[in-house]
Image: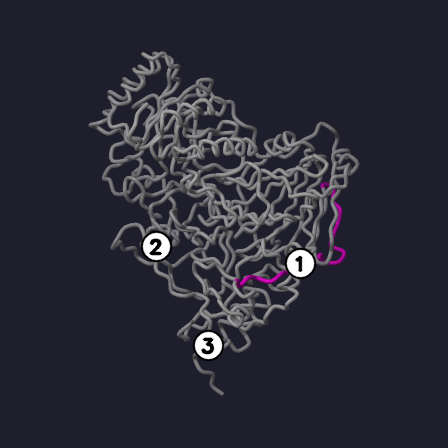
Amino acid sequence: MIMSLKSWLTGVAVLTLAAAASPQEADQCAAPIPSPRLDCYPVQVNFPNATEETCLAQGCCWDALDAIPCAFGRTTAPSTSLCDAVLPASRLACRNPRYFLTATDATTCAALGCCFDGTECFQPSFLGYDLKPQSWVETTSGYTGTLVLRSRGPFGNDISELSVEVTADASDQVRVRIFDPSFRRYEVPLPLHHPTTTSNSSSRNSTSSRLYSVSVTSSPFGIAITRISTGETLFNSTPAGHFNGLVFANQYLELSTSMPTSAPPTFFGLGEHVGRFLGNASGDRYTIWARDQPADTFHVHTSKGGDNVYGVHPFYIRVEDSGLAHGVFLLNSNALEAVATPHAITFRTVGGIIDLFVFVGPSAPSVVAQYTALVGRPMIPPYWSLGYHLCRWHYHSLDDVVSVVERMRAAGVPQDAQWTDIDVMDRYLDFTWDPTSFPQPKVSAFVDDLHAHGQHYVPIVDAGIAVTIPSYPAYEDGLAQHVFMKDGSNVSIEQNIVWPGMVAYPDFFHPNATSYWLKQLKRYYATAKYDGIWLDMNEPSSFCIEGGRESLSCVFNDSYAPYTFVRSQDTAYPFDPFRQPFVPGQAVNGNLAAMTASMAAHHVNSLHYNVHSLFGHSEIVATRLAVDSIRPTTRTFILSRSTFAGDGQYTAHWLGDNAATWEDLRQSIAGVLSMNVFGMPMVGPDVCGFGLNTTQELCIRWHQAAVRPYPYRTHIALCEVTY
């Protein structure tokens, strides 16, 4: 019998799926697909259409010859018990509403393998993995074990077997790593400072010195870390009715911990957001993903999430019933969401591995000390940076700036530093001066005058390097040294649009990036001897609405040649960088690439999908190396908008684009305290408010409130009133 071409292609697709994913995916596609086919990859403007790989990445079934080539497979409706086990506060939407079918009836929802309560279609409960019998072994530094998948997770493509490594050779902290032993997935390239001891190795590895105990549950798997002195739970991932078991799929990972307490849990952290200092555990979703979003009262944190701003700090401190405190840090740079309920905190992320640290404390200050000992202690800033600074967006000319400084001197105000925004640049090009409004010789003389009066100068540097200006040195040097990010083909330069027009972003992970950045900052220093550098727009920010020029959302009537996406070596098949079945903050915007570079773009070490939230960090490190080389005998100040865990050892941070309101003043205090918890004591707001018109009373009160936070910088935008 001769097989038809369509049947043959369908068979190939099924075989491909079976080889790439767990047996559950193969089973749902081997059976006849329900009719009518439910489209798993609807056509979306600004996004590529489905390919076999991107279809399989959704856990769906591919038939290239069908009018709906990517469709949901045959699934079994979840049982009532699995649906009832999901608490409303921690529900996971059946699919990302940004891209996929949103089921509004029980029949369609069940066909997607989800639960329906009359209004909402959500994923059922999952028990995760079992601990393989006899695999849990004590080692010289802790424990190891092997996990085996029980059943398909919410979106398929689950890793069938995992390794667990517990490092418990320090008395006051423990590390838990869960990873795929058969494929080296992306891991955060962050240098850590692991605990050391002066005692001999035998006592270091002794369980008698530990302030905690480690135990496991085999089926379903869970790991528990308990404080020995009080018996209180510090971390326990064993599913017992309040959350799922471990989920570890190619593009979706989930791990929870119970929070047994007699009252609503008290915790701090999980940033960066605008809002209260004390965490809210009533089902709040804390989205953690570097994003250029105004950090004002109009974008305050709400329970639905999606209000993440510039920094990425997946770390929290919880106060136990006894009054003792512990901390939890998830070392993961992929888009992440932490769901805080009265009984649990659940981490959900779209990539990487589980790399978890638990700090025993026992006080909140000691937890911060243990955390910063691991990720990096805060820097010692230059003394002058603790003083009073002035800045404004839209100084019209150098004469405006000189006038401000002279009036401050005449009034006897001890101004330590003057800053300038992008107004000083020639056509908004980094490392340049506007030849008319800020001519370089006069700027240089002005900076020399500041120094003669014991004052200092800090200019701004944006992340994007313009690509359309002939003979622009920063772009030509970048091309010569091959340091710019590549698009999804890993051939052409990834392009976005920011202030100067179309730009390229330096890939600060590239081995040539440090020398490239040093050359630019050294050339800049020769034109005006700055005392610090202000790094802005480094999430990185883009004016392309849907991410990257290839989305055709940067300017009207733009064009960009389609390319074939190439995965990075640390990204497993099947993979989709454009659409994901779950995205942190998807209730607000389910596109990770919104207002930034394409998630398909390549860095030298991985995809932007994985290292996006490290862009600011990598730029900070390159800047620190450069300025310390340029000014080796004195401390140089760096201020960055985007930060990652441990960046307090390199830079200061400001809370971003706030507004001139009393509520913003109040929230800035919480913002400073939160960043202090993250190991960044050198932090402050835009005093008086960046957006809207400030008032004299508000500005005075804000100056009073901001005396303690550093840097102490007044920075306003298009304010119509000057005080």
How far apart marks 3 and 2 lie (CA) works out to 30 Å
Q: Is residue 129 visible?
A: yes
Taking the image as shown, residue 518 lies to the left or right of residue 527, namely right
Q: Position of residue 17 (x, y in %)?
A: 53, 68
- In front here: 703 or 495? 703
Q: Position of residue 94 (x, y in %)?
A: 53, 62
Q: Position of residue 288 (x, y in %)?
A: 51, 45
Which element is circle 2 on? helix
Tell me the residue at 61%/47% (across/down).
345
- Which residue matches tag 1? 129
Taking the image as shown, residue 715 lies to the left or right of residue 280, namely left
- In front here: 605 or 660? 660
Q: Is residue 637 visible?
A: no
- Which residue matches tag 2? 551
- Which residue matches tag 3? 36
Q: Which callout, 2 or 1, points at the residue further toward the start of the chain? A: 1
- Please name the amino acid that badge 1 sits on: Tyr
Please rate how many residues cluster around mark 1, counting C-alpha atoms within 10 Å: few if below 14, some from 14 to 19, many from 20: many
Magenta range is 120-141
The residue mark sitting in front, 3 or 1, is 3
Which element is circle 1 on? strand
How far apart marks 3 and 1 lie (CA) works out to 34 Å
